[in-house]
Image (tube, rainbow, N blue to C red):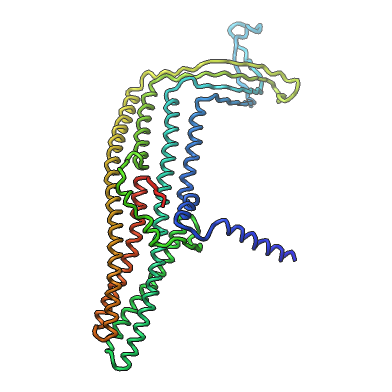
Amino acid sequence: MKQVIMFCFLIIYSFGFAQDRPNSFSLQEAIDYALENNRTAKNAARDIASAKKQKWETTAIGLPQIDASVNYQNFLKQQVSVVPAEFFGGNPGEFAEVIFGTQQSATATATLNQLLFDGSYLVGLQSAKVFLEISENAKAKTNLEVRKAVINAYGNVLLSEESVAIYEKNIAVLQKNLDETTKIFENGLEEEESVEQLQITLSNLNSNLNNAKRLRSIAYQMLNITMGIDFNASLKLKDDLETLAVKNISLKTLEEKNEVESTIDYKIAANDKKSKELLLKLEKSKALPRLSAFINGGYNSFSDDFAFLDSDNRWFGFSAVGVNLNLPIFSSGKRSAATQRAKINFEKSTDDLTETEQRLNLQIETAKSNYRFAIEDYTNKKQNLALAERIEKKNQTKFFEGVGSSFELRQAQTQLYTAQQSLLQTMLDVITAKAELETITNKISNN
């Protein structure tokens, strides 16, 4: 009975654990899931948490610091000093050996330090803030890349599913044609070449179907990895390729003004410029004085035996307060060289920001051009498929009526199959081109 109860418990627990992750995803649900579970996205979130801790770590440098120490000494052999013997009633010119202090001693001290002024600390506070901004922008960049990767992987799965379905449909139709043609040939009303032509076409379709099924498995595994799921997990997709393609057709997006400053890549380049500027300020601040204050206090105890823990042992207190002022005066040109080097790096980052701006303008225009072409190509391929279907149907009718050749039929069928795959690819191109444009511009539309 105990084994039965344990078995039932494990089944219920496993079922409950399996429910933590849904098995069916729309594209948006897949994106949302990936942003939470993709390993790269999770590490980017950890980088932000680390940057926040580093910001506080830098801030705490200027806050009061308290340290305590306990020191115990036991002289295995005490140091001997000599003094004139006449101090103790001896003969002039002679010396007496004496030992000062006890064999053992203990000291307990507590010190409070407070930084009053340090130019490097002020720059460090600004740098910590910029570092946090860099981490946040890196997380935003990662999210955009993860989103694009999910869209591409999701689209590839839909493409492979559609390809398999079309191949299976074409094979069924072609097999029916082959059976009918074979019967006509057996009755002596058709040439053997017609049968062989259809057999060649059918063989090619079967080969393509097998390859499409293998690619489908790989596409699912890629989507799983991108979403942060075990690559062999079973998934179901709610969306279909054509619906997504139509949703992603937006000519309004092509008319929007380029706003380079709002892109993540520009913000990252601006962060780099700001960090180089702060490094320049840091090198300059090293020529400023550093002022700090302290107060400490403690107790000393001395004994020839270890009696420091005894209640009647005497402890002697002490305390002090003071300030430390460090004045940089001369460094043989070291600080000047470091400052000039930081200035050069700052000038480089300024040019890099300008270069990034120009490059982003070009990337946006290129992405818009590719997106426009994908939309136009989708419309064109859709029309071509309709034409290819009519041509194939006409040639099939002509063939079975005996006025068309098997070569013409095979050519029309091959043209149809190519048009079908081309249309599927253009659907995916529309989706991925839109995702690429949104990734560059950092403008996510709600489809």
Foreground residue, 87 or 134?
Answer: 134
| Residue at figure coordinates x 35%, y 61% from the top left | 427
Foreground residue, 284 or 183?
Answer: 183
| Residue at figure coordinates x 54%, y 57% from the top left | 21
Whether residue 166 is situated above or below residue 445 in the rendered picture: below
| Residue at figure coordinates x 32%, y 86% from the top left | 181
Foreground residue, 55 or 229?
Answer: 229
Give residue 329's quadrant in the image: top left
x, y percent for residue 116: 49, 19
Give residue 131's quadrant in the image: top left
Give residue 331's quadrant in the image: top left
Foreground residue, 151 or 57?
Answer: 151
In the picture, the quarter occupied by the N terminus is bottom right
x, y percent for residue 398: 26, 82
x, y percent for residue 79: 60, 20
* Relative horizontal placement of residue 415, taking residue 301 as reference (left or right): left
Whether residue 438 is situated above or below residue 157 in the rendered picture: above
Whether residue 101 is situated above or below residue 266 in the rendered picture: above
* Relative horizontal placement of residue 167, taking residue 189 as reference (left or right): right
Can you name the residue that lies furthest to the bottom here?
187
Whether residue 203 is situated above or below residue 96 in the rendered picture: below
The mark tally for this picture is: 0
